[in-house]
C-alpha cells in the first residue's frame, strides 16, 4: 500500500484540526463564565495548533482582563494596566513573529511564554471597528509554527478575543443597570430601598444565628445652613465627601446607604450594642476631624459634623425593622437635641411585633 500524497496528508491533517476546533467552539458556545471558558481552552487548544503556552489580554475603559495558559494550567486575573510587553504590542496593532534567540525589539515577554525551550512567539492583535480589543501571544513548542498553526491560531484567537470582549461588555452593561436600580446617583451609596432590603436580610440572618445586629442612623448637622450659605453644589459636594468617608470606615460585610436627604443608614452584622457605639464614634471622627474642601467659585474648607443614633438587637428577640429603626432615629434625635456632633445609643426598651 502506497503512502498518500503530501497534498492528501495536508488535507487530512487540516480536517482533524477543524474537527478539534469545532468541538471546542461547541463546548464554549453555552458558556458565559470567563474562567470556565479559559479552562476549556487550555485543555483543548493543543489538539488543533502547536501552542505550548499563551496569553490573551482584553482591555477596555474598565481595565484589563488577563488570561494566561501555562503547562496545562490557566490563570485568570483583572489588572488596572497593561504590562510593558502587552502595552508595546497593543500600541503596534500589527501581527508579529518573535524568534527566540534573535535580538529582541521591545520589552521582555512574560516568563511563561519563554519556558520549556519554545522556538518562537506569535503576537496577534484583534481589532473591532479600528479599535484594538484584544492581544494574543502564543509560544510554539520546540518546533516553529507551520502554515496550519498560523491559520488555526488566527481563526480561534479572533473568536476567543471577541468572546471575552463581548462577555465583559455584557457584564458591564448589567452592572450599570443594577447600579441604577440599587445605587444613589449622587453619592454612589445604596439607595433607601436597597439598604432597607439589606437590613431585612441581615435581621433574618441574625435571628437564625442568634448573633447580634446593630444599626446606625446618622445625619449631617446644619445641612440646610450649608446649602443656604454656600449653594446646593457645595451641599452636593459635602454629601459626596461625607459618603466617601463613611464608606471608607465601613467594615467588610456591613452595609451603608443613603437613608434620606442628608441621612445615612449603616447596618452592622454581627455587632452588639457596645461595638455599635464604638463604630459610630469612628464614623463621627472620620467626618469631624477633617474639613470638607469645596473647590471652584467660593472655594473654602467647611467644618462638617454628623450626629448619630444606634440601635441593637441580640438576635434572640422578635423584632420589626420599623421598630429597630425607630429606636435608632429616636437616639439620633437626642444627639441633635444634646448639641450635635455626638453619638447616642437607643434606650433599653422592649421591641414588640412579629418578625419581618
Image (cartoon, rainbow, N blue to C red):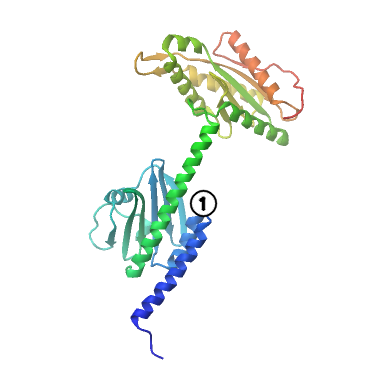
Q: Specify the quadrant of the image occupied by residue 157.
A: bottom left
> What is the x, y in percent for residue 84?
31, 48
**Front position in the image: 19 or 267:** 19
Q: Quadrant of the N terminus?
A: bottom left
Q: Name the residue that disc number 1 marks.
A: 33
> What is the x, y in percent for residue 41?
46, 60
Q: How many marks?
A: 1
Vertical order, 83 against 249 (above or below): below
Q: Is residue 71 visible?
A: yes
| SS assignment at label 1 | loop
292 left or right of 255 in image: left
Q: Which residue shows up at 37% across the image and 80% down it?
A: 8
> What is the x, y in percent for residue 142?
34, 69
242 left or right of 278 in image: left
182 left or right of 238 in image: right
Mark 1 crowdedness (10 Å alpha carbons): few <14, some 14-19, many ≥20: few
18 left or right of 125 in image: right
Vertical order, 335 against 171 (above or below): above
> What is the x, y in percent for residue 168?
45, 46
Q: Is residue 291 visible?
A: no
Q: Residue furthest front?
A: 129
Q: Quadrant of the C terminus?
A: top right
Q: Which residue shows up at 30% across the image and 54% down it?
A: 108
Q: Residue furthest bottom?
A: 1
Q: Specify the quadrant of the image occupied by residue 208.
A: top right
**Front position in the image: 40 or 175:** 175
Amino acid at each position: 500500500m502506497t503512502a498518500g500524497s503530501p497534498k492528501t496528508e495536508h488535507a487530512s491533517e487540516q480536517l482533524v484540526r477543524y474537527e478539534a476546533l469545532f468541538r471546542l467552539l461547541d463546548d464554549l458556545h453555552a458558556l458565559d463564565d470567563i474562567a470556565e471558558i479559559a479552562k476549556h481552552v487550555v485543555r483543548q487548544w493543543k489538539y488543533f495548533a502547536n501552542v505550548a503556552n499563551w496569553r490573551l489580554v482584553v482591555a477596555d475603559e474598565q481595565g484589563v482582563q488577563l488570561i494566561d495558559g501555562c503547562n496545562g494550567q490557566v490563570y485568570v486575573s483583572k489588572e488596572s494596566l497593561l504590562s510593558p510587553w502587552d502595552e508595546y504590542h497593543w500600541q503596534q496593532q500589527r501581527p508579529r513573529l518573535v524568534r527566540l534567540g534573535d535580538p529582541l525589539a521591545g520589552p521582555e515577554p512574560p516568563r511563561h511564554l519563554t519556558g520549556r525551550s519554545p522556538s518562537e512567539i506569535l503576537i496577534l492583535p484583534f481589532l473591532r471597528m479600528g479599535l484594538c480589543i484584544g492581544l494574543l501571544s502564543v509560544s510554539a513548542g520546540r518546533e516553529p509554527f507551520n502554515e496550519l498553526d498560523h491559520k488555526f491560531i488566527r481563526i480561534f484567537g479572533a473568536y476567543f478575543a471577541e468572546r471575552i470582549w463581548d462577555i465583559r461588555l455584557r457584564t458591564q452593561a448589567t452592572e450599570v443597570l443594577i447600579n441604577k436600580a440599587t445605587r444613589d446617583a449622587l453619592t454612589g451609596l445604596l439607595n433607601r430601598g436597597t439598604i432597607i432590603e439589606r437590613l431585612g436580610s441581615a435581621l433574618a440572618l441574625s435571628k437564625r444565628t442568634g448573633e447580634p445586629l446593630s444599626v446606625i442612623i446618622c445625619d449631617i448637622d446644619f445641612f440646610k445652613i450649608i446649602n443656604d450659605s454656600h449653594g446646593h453644589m457645595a451641599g452636593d459636594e459635602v454629601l459626596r465627601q461625607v459618603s466617601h468617608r463613611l464608606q471608607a470606615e465601613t467594615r467588610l460585610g456591613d452595609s451603608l446607604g443613603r437613608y434620606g436627604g442628608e441621612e445615612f443608614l449603616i447596618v452592622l452584622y454581627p455587632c452588639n450594642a457596645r461595638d455599635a457605639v464604638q463604630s459610630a464614634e469612628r464614623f463621627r471622627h472620620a467626618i469631624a476631624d477633617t474639613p470638607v474642601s469645596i473647590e471652584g467659585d467660593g472655594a473654602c474648607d467647611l467644618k462638617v459634623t454628623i450626629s448619630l443614633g444606634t440601635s441593637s438587637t441580640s438576635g434572640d428577640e422578635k423584632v420589626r425593622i420599623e421598630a429597630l429603626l425607630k429606636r435608632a432615629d429616636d437616639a439620633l434625635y437626642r444627639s441633635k437635641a444634646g448639641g450635635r456632633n455626638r453619638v447616642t445609643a437607643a434606650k433599653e426598651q422592649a421591641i414588640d411585633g412579629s418578625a419581618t
